[in-house]
Image: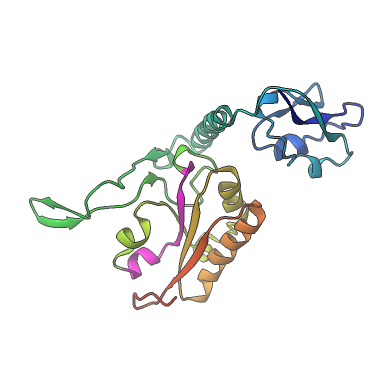
Amino acid sequence: MIRKIIYIDEEKCNGCGLCASACHEGAIELVDGKAKLVRENFCDGFGDCLPNCPTGAISFEEREAPAYDEAAVKAAQKKKAVEKLMREVQAAGGCPGSRMMELRRDSAPEQETSPLGVRSVSRLNQWSCQIKLLPTQAPFFDGAKLLIAADCTAYAYANMHEEFMRGKVTIIGCPKLDAVDYTDKLTEIIRDNDIKSVTIVRMEVPCCGGLQRAAENALRNSGKFIPWQVVTISRDGNILD
């Protein structure tokens, strides 16, 4: 088929690799020190790589090329994410607590009966849930409604699992105790996955503003238009807004 696809001028290319990093589909790789379009069916024709090229070596052209294969791109991204996670686990000494696990308990009833009586059901759909431990790409992010929550909210708000976590992928953190800006990692998660919506649940205390700002900056930096909301929990366990 004839379609719009990128063209790389090898004479202008300086081999910096910025275009390959900007191509989230994985269509571009460095070969012998030059950027090359190695998978034409992975190129969506949107040109995210163009503004990242410092030498102007990339442009658009209309020519015969295979159709963009979104399914193949997603499969490759998932494989890459798993491989990256395994490398991170190995680098951390193979800690079992860092290993990714998809739980998917959305269909469970609100309560279940045990020999000790009736108890509530967990709505955590994946492990790990800590922002610092999560990979930026994982199968459970595909089509997910994302809940970005401050650590303390689950303790302050009694019905956190049913009202906020149910049906969502929950990721948590504390910008004060973790002493880190989550912006870059949250940007990658939102930008590189098919996130359907974002809910930010924070405490009313000022330090929780760091989590909200990081999430809002990530939404802007991702270049996507995704429905989002912020919910603030008071220290006595009520919803403020």
Residue 134 percent location from the top left of the image: 49, 45
Relative depth, front residue between 3 and 43? 3
The residue lying at 30 percent from left, 45 percent from top is: 105
Task: Name the quadrant of the C terminus.
Answer: bottom left
The residue lying at 35 percent from left, 76 percent from top is: 238
Q: Is residue 206 left or right of residue 184?
A: left
Relative to 203, is 131 above or below? above
Q: Give the range drawn in magenta.
A: 141-157
The magenta stretch spans residue 176: no
Residue 201 percent location from the top left of the image: 45, 65
Relative to 44, is 189 above or below? below
Task: Name the quadrant of the N terminus.
Answer: top right
Relative depth, front residue between 91 and 83? 83
Residue 73 percent location from the top left of the image: 59, 30
Question: Residue 59 appears in which quarter of the rendering?
Answer: top right
Q: In this view, does 168 lie to the left or right of 16?
A: left
Q: How many labels does the image show?
A: 0
Q: Is residue 34 left or right of residue 97?
A: right
Q: Is residue 33 left or right of residue 85?
A: right
Residue 2 percent location from the top left of the image: 74, 25
- Of all residues, the one furthest to the left in this rendering is 115
The magenta stretch spans residue 150: yes
Question: Residue 35 appears in which quarter of the rendering?
Answer: top right
